[in-house]
Image (spheres, rainbow, N blue to C red):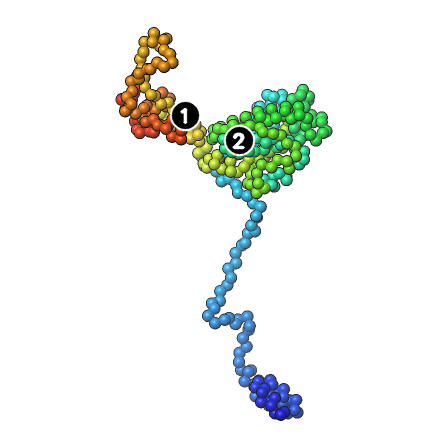
Amino acid sequence: MRDAPYRRSKGLKGRISRESSSGISREPYVKKYEEPLKNIPQIEKANVKPAGVRAYAAPTRKVDRYDFTKVEKLALDQERYLEKVLIHFAELLTALLVSILRLRIQIKWENNDYVSYDVYTHSLVDPSALNVFNIEGVNARGIIFLEFPLCLTIIDRLLGGKGQPVSEDNRLTELEEVIFCRLIQKVLGQFSEAFKEIKEFTVKNEKMECNPQAVQLYSPSEPMAIANFRIRIGDMPGDMKICLPLQFLKPVIPKVKPSELLPRTTVNSKGQKITTNPIILESARIGIVVELGRSDIMFQDLVNIGVGDVVRLNMSIENPLRVKIEGKTKFLGRPGVREKKVALQICKVVQEGDEEFEEQ
């Protein structure tokens, strides 16, 4: 029965351990199996690779950290054009405040920031002079921020003072709010004037708030563009910020190169030099007139004309109508209706020099 363990132990280790325990020397077995192993070259474990796997060096490259709080911005060309508009607005606002406050005014545009709406509102202090305005026609709203001491300085000057923040209260009276909001409405008028060359819109002041957390216009993650201005009214310095949604600025600000912002000089057919700005021309509004027809009547008939009288024109119902720009016929079209409004479909472009359509 004691021989059974020797038969079940098939490994070298098991045999040696059993024999050594019974008093038999293990040296012959060790020499027999260890001496051939000395001739086998040693292989480092790090160099052992699975069969069929090709060794390669992992590429080393620089990894940039991604900022999840980063918001989108305007394109570089749009940023330059917006800078030009804001500098023009600072000049218009300086002239306006000088004429109203009769003080030495300095307004300088500094830079633009792009942050989320939540970051912007949490960066404001309480109290602050915050005026919410609405840009009609484009479904956008913005905020004009003014430091509270600067607001008190303006109100003191408008009420006949020397332009010093004499009030220590953190809130304005109803009368002071009305006076300040009237001034802000004039400021917004200059703001729309600065954007006039690229887009015409009307801006109206909606309300005034002193607590930044009470102004919730957009979702916290909405990207906003913040225009930063440095203002000095008399001896009182301060900051002014205009907050606008990026969804409003992107389609409004044109994507042009700096060279395209410069005016161009051309020579017309009469040899006259004409200086134009292509951006202004693209957004210029031109009125057109559709002429239904003409008729000559006696002066006595004109005096006696009344409601219900019919004046016969020289145009046939089969002939197209003339479309005039600045008094000259440029197109021909046919009248119709589209979306419950009178419309005109252009059917021909009148070439310059066509004697048939020369004005008499």
**On the rendered image, what quadrant is the N terminus found in?**
bottom right
Taking 228 as reference, is 355 left or right?
left
Q: Amino acid at mark 2?
A: Ile
- How far apart in space, not on screen, are marks 2 and 1 (Cα)? 23 Å
Q: Residue at x 68, y 26 (%)?
A: 173
Closer to us: 330 or 339: 339
In the drawing, does residue 54 fall left or right of residue 32? left
Image coordinates for residue 267, horizontal then vertical, percent: 36, 26
Q: Earlier in the sequence, mark 2 or mark 1?
A: 2
Looking at the rendered structure, the secondary structure element under dot 1 is: loop
Eyeballing the image, is 30 above or below 300? Answer: below
Q: Mark 1 is on which residue type?
A: Ile
> Circle 1 sits on which residue?
286
- Residue extending farthest to the front is 308
Q: Relative to the observer, which residue lies in front, 37 or 280?
A: 280
In the displayed structure, 166 sits above or below 58; it is above
Q: Position of residue 126 (x, y in %)?
A: 67, 35
Tell me the mark number nearer the camera, choosing from 2 and 1.
2
Q: Which residue is mark 2?
A: 135
Point 60% across, 85% down: residue: 14
How many other residues sit within 10 Å of disc 1, few (<14), some (14-19) or many (≥20)?
Answer: few
